[in-house]
Every structure is written in C-alpha cells, then in structure tokens.
C-alpha cells in the first residue's frame, strides 16, 4: 500500500510579518492556499490589506517568516522570476493607457504575455463589447473598473490579487466579478481579495486584520452620543 504525501499548498504564508515605513503592519500571519482556494481580507482602513497584497506581489519583503510557492521561498530570485508570472493584479490604481482604445488596452497585456485572441471575448464577458473602439476617457468609473477586470480574463495567470475589485461596480458588475472569480477557481486558480464591500465567494477563508491603533472616538460616535430627543 502506498501512502500519498499531502500535496504542498500552492501558497503558504508561514508566520509572516511585514513592516512599512519602519512600522510593523502585519504580524505573524499564517495562510495556506491550495489550487481553487480563495482568501478574503477584511479589516479597517489602514489595517494592512493593501500591504498584504503588495507583499504577495513582491513589492515588499516580509520582515519575518516566509512566503512559499510550491514549497519554495519567493524571496529567492530564481523562484521569484517564475512566481511573478503566476500573478494577475487589480488595484484601485487604474493601469489604463488613455492613448489606446478599450480593446487595445487589453491587447497590450496579451502582447506582453505573448498570447493573443481573448481580448474581445474578455470585454464582452464584462459587458464592454460595444465600447471596444472607444478611448478609455469615454468610460464611466464602473466601466473602467470592468476594463481592469477584463484583463484578468485575457491573460492566463493562476493567482489573482484583487485589491478592492468591486469599487464603482453596479449590482450587475459585482455579479460578473463573482462569476469570473468562481470560474477561475473551478479551473484551479487562486483568488485573494481585499474588500470592504460584500462579494460572494463560496468556501473562502476570511482573514480579518486587526486595526493598527486602538480606535479613538470618531465623529460618528460623537453623533451617536448627542441626545436629540
Ligand atoms: N505609501 C506608504 N508609505 C508608508 N506607509 C504607508 C503607505 N501606505 C500605507 N502606509 C501605512 O501602512 C498601513 C497599512 O496601510 P494599507 O494601505 O495596507 O491599509 P489597508 O488595510 O489597505 O487600508 P484601506 O482599507 O484604506 O485600503 C497604514 O496604516 C499606513 O499608515
Ligand atoms: Mg487598501
């Protein structure tokens, strides 16, 4: 009888801490993600969600602990070269080239990736097919967000890092986002989402980051205390 060793998680954060601007932002985070897994990061403004994403994307290094991809430390340069090709990132930064048309904005990423052919379909899935020939300045905020999300579909990368992906989306846009996340996971992709807004993601792990400072009294608290009777 052969005993099968459990597969390594695709991504493992082992007691990871992270500093930013000489301050400890994340402390001793442990997360394990297999193919098809999803992690939702929540927490107050400033609690470290974007810092977490930036660290996973390799923009900043853990100050303690390690991030393992297929069991290998992503800090090692040869590993990082392969690891970064697994990532697809959407953040509040627009990353849209105003000189290109909507379609060319997606084709540009396909070109960088050395692949072609999915750009128009990606736009259609996100409900932007009819705007393909327009310049991005013709798009509303929610349509620009859909354009960013279309990029996820056009290039084939298994690990999605989504920082506030539903900001500016209408109800249908949020449904589409939930749909593409579910489809990506069915194909074995991993999704890590930081969000303040509710996004339905089945069987996801939730990591609520603690506030960095004890919360003082806010204007909203003061209003609560005012007796208006
Ligand atoms: N560019 C920066 N340089 C130095 N420190 C920063 C910078 N951006 C954020 N920080 C600090 O890092 C902490 C974590 O910020 P981060 O952006 O990760 O929080 P967040 O959870 O994503 O917040 P939000 O919900 O507002 O997006 C903040 O408290 C802030 O003080
Ligand atoms: Mg943030």
Image: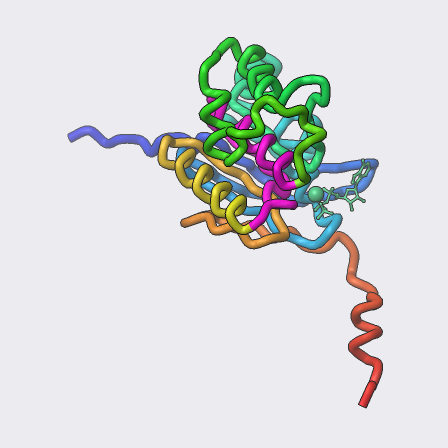
The answer to whether residue 7 is left or right of residue 199 is left
Residue 155 is a magenta residue: yes
Q: What residue span does the magenta drawing correspond to?
A: 142-170
The answer to whether residue 160 is left or right of residue 195 is left
In the rendered image, residue 121, in percent from the top left (x then y), is placed at 45, 25
In the rendered image, residue 164, in percent from the top left (x then y), is placed at 63, 43
Position of residue 70 relative to residue 125, above or below, is: above
Which residue is located at x 50 percent, y 37 percent? 191
In the rendered image, residue 15, in percent from the top left (x then y), is placed at 59, 40
Tell which residue pokes out farthest to the left in this image: 1
Which quadrant holds residue 135?
A: top right
The answer to whether residue 151 is left or right of residue 185 is right
Which residue is located at x 48 percent, y 47 percent? 175
In the rendered image, residue 27, in percent from the top left (x then y), is placed at 67, 45
Which quadrant holds residue 17?
A: top right
Residue 60 is a magenta residue: no
Which residue is located at x 42 percent, y 34 percent? 184
């Amino acid at each position: 009888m052969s005993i099968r060793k459990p597969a390594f998680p695709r991504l493992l954060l082992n007691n990871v801490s992270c500093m930013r601007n000489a301050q400890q932002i994340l402390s001793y985070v442990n997360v394990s993600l297999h193919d098809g897994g999803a992690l939702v990061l929540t927490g107050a403004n400033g609690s470290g969600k974007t810092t977490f994403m930036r660290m996973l994307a390799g923009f900043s290094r853990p100050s303690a602990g390690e991030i393992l991809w297929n069991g290998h430390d992503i800090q090692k340069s040869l590993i990082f070269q392969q690891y970064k090709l697994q990532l697809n990132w959407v953040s509040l930064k627009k990353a849209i080239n105003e000189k290109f048309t909507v379609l060319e904005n997606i084709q540009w990423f396909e070109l960088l990736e050395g692949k072609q052919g999915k750009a128009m379909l990606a736009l259609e899935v996100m409900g932007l097919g009819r705007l393909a020939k327009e310049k991005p300045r013709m798009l509303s905020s929610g349509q620009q967000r859909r354009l960013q999300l279309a990029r996820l579909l056009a290039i084939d990368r298994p690990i999605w890092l989504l920082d506030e992906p539903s900001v500016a989306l209408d109800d249908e846009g949020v449904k589409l986002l939930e749909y593409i996340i579910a489809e990506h996971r069915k194909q074995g992709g991993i999704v890590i989402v930081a969000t303040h807004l509710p996004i339905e993601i089945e069987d996801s792990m939730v990591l609520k980051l603690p506030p960095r400072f004890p919360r003082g009294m806010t204007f909203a608290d003061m209003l609560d205390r005012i007796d208006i009777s």
